[in-house]
Amino acid sequence: MGSPGSPEGVPHRKGLHMASLGTYAYRPGNTAIHRMGASVKFFILLAITVGSFFLGPVGLGLGALIVLLGALACRLKPAFLFSGSGPLLVTSTFIFLLKAFRFTPPYFDSEGALQGLLYIVGIGVSFAGGALLFATTTSRDLRKTLMDLEKVLLTPLVWVLSKTSLPWAKRWERSFIRPRLALSISLMLSFIPRIFEVWENTELAYRARLGKRGIRRYGTLILLVTERLMEAAGETALALEARAFGYAELERAAKSRASNSAEVLDE
């Protein structure tokens, strides 16, 4: 249990305050949604997103209700799903203004305002649904789901290529056997919580230094966050390299060099 004054669910021991879990970060639990298959949750999120944007107010309401019930079932405060959404709020405000106001001639478009409002709510529901997915699904489960999906989609193509005698078809067949696309997408998805973590840490540091308030602060924050994310991406690439990411290519290169060396010795 967390101590008084500490964030919910974050322990506090002997003056050492552990880092809180940010937006789109996994929160361990044993609820039914935590135990649900990642593929099922992924397709539910896809259905919520499609319904929120293309099925009008009914789809939007159903999507919001599903996300709300899911958050309550996982014992998560609905407000948690929107933490770190400050830039999204600013962007949504601009979208609403562009939809609601016309400048030639100047007038308020009530129909455009309604469409803009529905679009903004749809973005919010999709954002909250994504936060719920990441809060209840580990990156390993997401990667496994994507690999299984890629395998299902590519198996027919691999079979067709295996029946083709063209040299390029064989090369494509060998490249499609490995789930590279799923791995790349899973790495991208796993980096999303890092983006919010960098944003929140940068914003806290900016506030501590009494930076500018209001919308103007986002101009400075975006530059700082972009720089830090580039550094984080470089650190991630180095970590992947240290963990032998792409080991198969290195192994093939090593075998090729070994065979070339053996041929030189034989000569």
Image (spheres, rainbow, N blue to C red):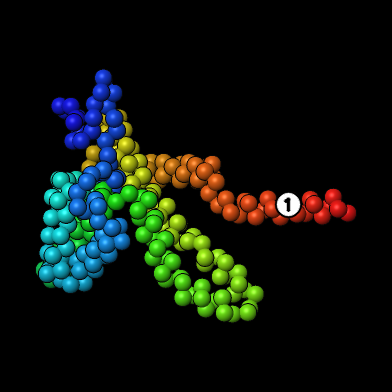
Q: Residue at x 75, y 54 (%)?
A: 259
229 relative to 260, above or below: above
Q: Quarter of the image containing the N terminus?
A: top left
Where on the picture, by quarter, is residue 147? bottom left
In percent of width and height, residue 142 lies at: 35, 55
The answer to which of 17 and 256 lies nearer the viewer is 256
Is residue 182 at least partly visible in the picture?
yes
In percent of width and height, residue 83 lies at: 22, 45
In percent of width and height, residue 188 lies at: 41, 53
Q: Give the amino acid at mark 1.
A: Arg
Is residue 219 at least partly visible in the picture?
no
Answer left or right for 158 relative to 130.
right
Q: Residue at x 23, y 30 (%)?
A: 11
In percent of width and height, residue 195 lies at: 35, 46
Count of numbered circles in the view:
1
Q: Which residue is mark 1?
A: 257
Q: Residue at x 49, y 42 (%)?
A: 239
Answer left or right for 94 relative to 187.
left
Q: Residue at x 41, y 41 (%)?
A: 228
Where on the picture, by quarter, is residue 28? top left
Label 1 neighbourhood size at 10 Å, few (<14), some (14-19), many (20+)? few
The answer to which of 23 and 91 lies nearer the viewer is 23
Answer left or right for 231 relative to 118.
right
Where on the picture, by quarter, is residue 107? bottom left
Q: In the structure shown, which secondary structural element does the residue marked by tag 1 occupy? A: helix
20 relative to 112, above or below: above
The answer to which of 255 and 203 lies nearer the viewer is 255
As drawn, the residue found furthest toward the right would be: 267
Q: Quarter of the image containing the C terminus?
A: bottom right
As drawn, the residue found furthest toward the top would be: 14
